[in-house]
Image (cartoon, coloured by chain):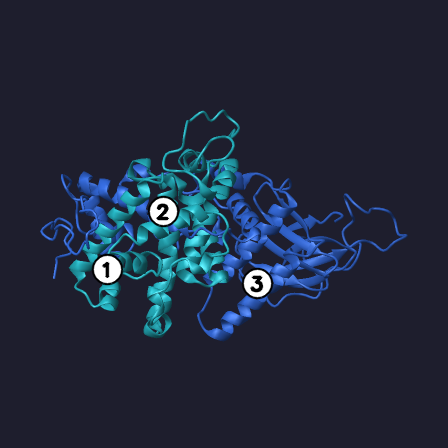
Chain colours: A cyan, B blue
Amino acid sequence: MSVEQTGERGPVRGWVGGQGRAGERGRGPDDLLPLVAVGDHRAFEDLYGMVSGPVYGLVRRVLRDPAQSEEVAQETLLEVWRTAGRFDPRRGSALAWILTLAHRRAVDRVRSARSAADREARVGGQAEGPAFDQVAEAVEGRLEREWVRGCLTRLTELQRQSVTLAYYEGYSYREVAHRLAVPLGTVKTRMRDGLTRLRECLGAAV
Amino acid sequence: MTSNRPADRSTDRPSDRSGGAPAYRGGRGRKAHVLAGAYALNALDPKERRRYERHLARCPGCAQEVRDLAQGAVRLARAVAAPAPPQMRQRVLAAAQATPQEASSAADGGYAAPPARAAHAGRSGPGGRRARGGGYLRRPVFGLRLAGAVAALSLIAAAVLGVELVRTRDRLDQERGATRAVEQVLSAPDAHGVSGRDVQGRGINAVTSRRLGAAVVTVSGLPAPPDGRTYQLWMIDAAPEGSSEGSSGGAPEGSATPRSAGLLKGSGEGTSLVTGGFGAHTERLAVTLEPDGGSTRPTTNPVVQLALGDP
């Protein structure tokens, strides 16, 4: 399976800047994933270069523990290799799909860890902490972080907390409702509104 | 309390408490559903998620909204991107070399992602579904680069440990110790990777460090041993200096006494042994079938063997 074929596929949808930049061959995850799905190892290597940072960073944001994060990130990327054929571009970008796999694995792990007794102890108080300190050393994606940070401040407090507790801390919306002492329906709405506003704000950056 | 039923859109309502920020426009003109946000953030319980995915398959508007919202989640993820540990790269790439792919099923209606925990490096055996790309496994792996071989073994070892993980602390520590021992060999400056596979797919992979006097060995493709029999791994040293030079190629059987490197569990699939006593002159590894409990010397001809070559 040749990977070196000319890849004049044009600009990559939804993929700009930071470490997500498409490779010199001009291909992004959306181009590479279908190649991976047919067993193209070179494409997988390129894809790894593009997505390992976001995958690892996200997993570590949720899990905190570097060793566990590495394990989960590895499992995720191998799952990408294994199940690339399931990716359906009609349902979203390749990166979104990959990050969904990563997030689910991380969240599965953090939820089962939490249900083991330390539910309250582990998080008490830190849930509202800054979402970015953990990865401050990451040089890449700094601009991206600034944008997101800026956009997060434009959400209402409840929207921001609903979104970040779910995405960065791995809480289900029920848990978020419980922690914030608001009705379930309110949390669902805030999650949607918060993400919508975030996307609108961030859209300007793309 | 709002219903979780995906078809229930009665809970749709404009965002309140917007605090002077621009008005929410997300739901207008779409069949937006209030769960879309929670879904995009992966904040639904597994059961609700499955239900919502069934709903998405019937609700193009909702699917579109989820797609859009997911882009917001992607930005959240990219904002916390961090360089993956350097050693991860070769592990993942090499594990992919050894892992068959699933048959494509994007068209089968499964909405989003496959169930987590499905992927598993150590179980790339005959049971796995083999897809178009699966032919890679069949290929002889002699050409595998050193780094790749090293990493593959490392990941396989780690994954195997992961599966059998019983979450008690001491067991965990024990296993981490084993992983550490494996990693020590793999990261030795003189680590040397060799692997071979015969036409029937039976093979040995080894990473050796003569400096550490240790090797990490995995075998694959062996059938289950007959009752009362166990696979045993042997290290075979080169004939002593000065004796007839059969040094490489066709080294005669029994050029030196094989030394046991341990017993393999079952068919040896996924087993990884860190074996001490690996010497400067060890030139081959071999696996034989022995009576349960093992033998002090091989009693049968090797099922598979691997020449290690010079580091």
Q: CA distance from mark 3 to mark 1?
A: 44 Å
Q: Return the residue found at the far left.
A: B10
Q: Which mark is residue A158?
A: 1
Mark 3 falls within which chain?
Answer: B
First reached walking from the N terminus: tag 2 or tag 3: 2
Viewer-nearest of labels 1 and 2?
1
Q: Secondary structure at mark 3?
A: helix
Asked if residue B235 lies left or right of residue A48, the reply is right
The residue pinned by badge 3 equals B179
Q: Which mark is residue B224?
A: none
Asked if residue B298 lies left or right of residue B273, the reply is right
Q: Secondary structure at mark 2?
A: helix
Residue at x 61%, y 60% (from the top left corner):
B182
**Mark 3 is on which residue type?**
Thr
The residue pinned by badge 2 equals B75
Viewer-nearest of labels 3 and 1?
1
Q: Is residue B127 visible?
A: no
Nearest to the observer: residue B224 or residue A80: A80
Residue B261 lies, with reference to residue A74, above or below; the image says below
Image quadrant in which the C terminus of chain A is located: top left
Mark 1 falls within which chain?
Answer: A
Q: Return the residue found at the far front.
A: B20
Viewer-nearest of labels 2 and 3?
2
Image quadrant of residue A125? Answer: bottom left
Residue A56, image x, y percentages: 46, 53
Residue B107, image x, y percentages: 30, 37
- Answer yes or no: do the residues labelled 3 and 1 have beta carbons within 8 Å? no
**Mark 1 is on which residue type?**
Leu
Residue at x 41%, y 50% (from the top left corner):
A145
